[in-house]
């Protein structure tokens, strides 16, 4: 089957695009390719994430399934404790509700978007 389109970028709404781009730049080690008050982007030409300023932005309410959250990012890490600690130092928050047991952690980025840090497949730890 031939694809109709290819994914250009995932975009996250937020109040402060520059700050959220900096957070994910630090987490994913992807360069910031554009940044102003209205939008910012990180990417390597294959993986690209955009951040757009929305007036009156309100973060999703984790784990409320009736809130505005409709998707989240899953990120691989080799060590969950280390990844969580480093993300929290960068401004992430660990919510109380954690459904992943010892295989993944739910964190909230500085704009309130949930994201999961997951053990890389094949990791025995």
Image: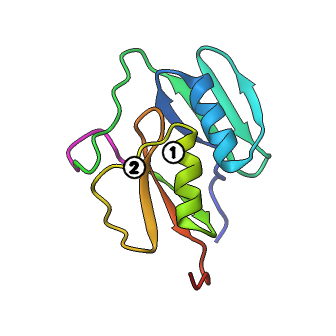
The percent coordinates of residue 67 (x first, y second) are: 24, 41
Q: Check the image and tell me how it is coloured.
A: rainbow
Residue where numbered disc 2 is placed: 94
On the rendered image, what quadrant is the C terminus found in? bottom right
Considering the image in quadrants, where does the N terminus appear? Answer: bottom right
In terms of sequence position, does the residue under pointer 2 or pointer 1 come before the other?
Answer: 1
**Left or right side of 12 for 76:** right
The segment highlighted magenta reads 65-70
Residue at 63%, 32% in the rendered image: 21
Q: Which residue is mark 1?
A: 88
* Image spot of residue 6 (x, y percent): 66, 53
Q: Which mark is residue 79?
A: none
Mark pair 2, 1: CA separation: 8 Å
* Residue 67 belongs to the span the image colors magenta: yes
Look at the picture and state if 122 lies above or below 23: below
Alpha-carbon neighbours of circle 2 within 10 Å: few (<14), some, or many (≥20)? some
Residue at 79% over, 46% down: 44
Q: Name the secondary structure under disc 1.
A: helix
**Foreground: 36 or 20?**
20
Q: Position of residue 78 (x, y in %)?
A: 63, 70
Front residue (pair 79, 71): 79
Please check the rendered image and state whether residue 120 is part of the magenta-colored stretch, yes or no.
Answer: no
Marks 2 and 1: CB-CB under 8 Å?
yes
Vertical placement of 14 versus 36: above or below?
A: below
Element class at badge 2? loop
Say how many tags the image has. Answer: 2
């Amino acid at each position: 089957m031939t694809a109709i389109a290819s994914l250009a970028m995932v975009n996250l709404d937020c109040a402060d695009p520059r700050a959220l781009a900096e957070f994910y730049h630090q987490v994913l080690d992807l360069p910031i390719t554009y940044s102003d008050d209205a939008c910012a982007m990180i990417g390597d030409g294959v993986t690209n994430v955009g951040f757009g300023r929305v007036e009156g932005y309100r973060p999703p309410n984790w784990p409320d399934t009736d809130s505005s959250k409709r998707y989240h990012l899953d990120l691989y890490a080799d060590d969950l404790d280390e990844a969580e600690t480093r993300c929290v130092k960068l401004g992430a928050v660990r919510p109380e509700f954690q459904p992943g047991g010892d295989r993944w952690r739910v964190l909230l980025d500085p704009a309130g978007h949930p994201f999961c840090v997951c053990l890389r497949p094949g990791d025995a730890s």
